[in-house]
Image (cartoon, rainbow, N blue to C red):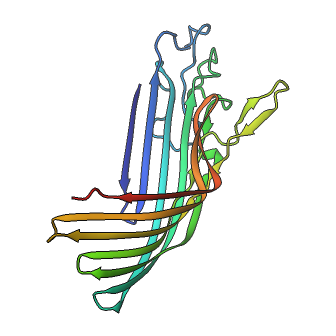
């Protein structure tokens, strides 16, 4: 099994990830002009898909992904502090505007359905088991605002308490085998279909904490109580006949306390 992944940033904030993954399986001959029985046809990408490796692949390649992920992000932010009581009580507020453009393209190829399938010039790719990501038009755009606010109180020079409200999110994405039926019942009816995409998950965080130092800075103890409220929380699930898919659930909540060891 071999694989490679490369990621780099463009000059305008664009991010690209090119992934190639190959699984080599030995023990069965590839089909040829003289070998037409008991063989597996050489696999290859879908015509017109965004791939690096064109044409039929070597005999020992049975499964592989040749895909392109592209994320373009444009964002700007602003933040301001205001001393309600100088050096004692400070209010901070900020906001960020973002624009994400996502793209997923390429070929995800399996040798399933390619048994004794001849010698197609560009390689075998049975649409029942392989996926042309370009044909699925996996692209979208998301824009919005995320903000934060913070109130800091220096009770004493070495004791500070604070409250923070902040927002966050993770951009959504795509499942490479979207709209594929799974878990067929006795009548051949699919119990579910893989969703084409999953939306971004969004977070509102409320945090109340403190930072302290005692005994001429020899003892330090920090801690915080926080509650995170998620909207469209993302989860990853394993499914039969495929590795995993991403989906979202309506809401989720995390409440916790965290503290450093006194030192």
Q: Quadrant of residue 188?
A: top right
In percent of the image, x 40 and y 84: which residue is there? Answer: 91
Which residue reaches farthest bottom? 85
Q: Nearer the viewer, residue 143 or 140?
A: 143
Is residue 162 shown left or right of residue 212?
Answer: right
Q: Position of residue 168 (x, y in %)?
A: 49, 65
Image coords of residue 164 (percent x, y): 44, 73
Q: Is residue 78 visible?
A: yes
Q: Could you tell me residue 187's position as x and y percent? A: 85, 26
For residue 41, which quarter of the picture?
Answer: top right
Taking the image as drawn, is residue 48 in sight? no
Q: Is residue 13 left or right of residue 177?
A: left
Kindly identify the residue that appears in the image at 62 percent across and 22 percent down. 112
Q: The C terminus is located in which quarter?
A: bottom left
Residue 48 percent location from the top left of the image: 57, 42
Q: Is residue 228 above or below residue 26?
A: below
In this view, the residue farthest toward the front is 215
How many dots with numbers? Answer: 0
Q: Quadrant of the N terminus?
A: top left
Drawn side of residue 92 relative to residue 106, left or right: left
Quadrant position of residue 261 = bottom left
The residue sitting at 35% across, 86% down in the picture is 89
With respect to residue 126, does 31 lie above or below?
Answer: above
User: Which residue is rendered at x = 54% and y = 53% of the image?
Assistant: 103
| Front in this rendered view, residue 238 or 115 | 238
């Amino acid at each position: 099994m071999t694989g490679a992944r490369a990621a780099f940033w463009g000059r305008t904030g664009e991010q690209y990830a090119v992934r190639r993954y190959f699984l080599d399986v030995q023990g069965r001959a590839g089909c040829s002009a003289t070998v037409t029985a008991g063989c597996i046809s050489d696999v290859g990408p879908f015509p017109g898909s965004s791939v690096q490796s064109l044409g039929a692949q070597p005999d020992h390649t049975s499964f592989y992904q040749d895909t392109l992920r592209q994320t373009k992000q444009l964002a700007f932010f602003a933040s301001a502090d205001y001393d309600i009581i100088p050096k004692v009580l400070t209010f901070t507020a900020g906001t960020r505007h973002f624009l994400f453009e996502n793209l997923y393209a390429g070929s995800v190829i399996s040798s399933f359905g390619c048994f004794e399938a001849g010698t197609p010039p560009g390689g075998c790719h049975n649409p029942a088991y392989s996926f042309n990501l370009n044909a699925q038009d996996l692209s979208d755009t998301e824009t919005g605002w995320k903000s934060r606010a913070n109130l800091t109180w220096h009770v004493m020079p070495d004791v500070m308490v604070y409250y923070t409200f902040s927002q966050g999110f993770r951009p959504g994405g795509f499942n490479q085998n979207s709209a594929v039926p799974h878990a067929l019942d006795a009548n051949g009816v699919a119990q579910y279909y893989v969703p084409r995409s999953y939306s971004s998950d969004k977070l509102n965080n409320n945090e109340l904490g403190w930072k302290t130092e005692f005994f001429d800075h020899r003892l330090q103890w920090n801690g915080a109580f926080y509650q995170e409220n998620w909207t469209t929380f993302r989860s990853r699930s394993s499914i039969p006949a495929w590795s995993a898919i991403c989906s979202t659930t309506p809401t989720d909540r995390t409440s916790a306390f965290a503290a450093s060891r006194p030192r």
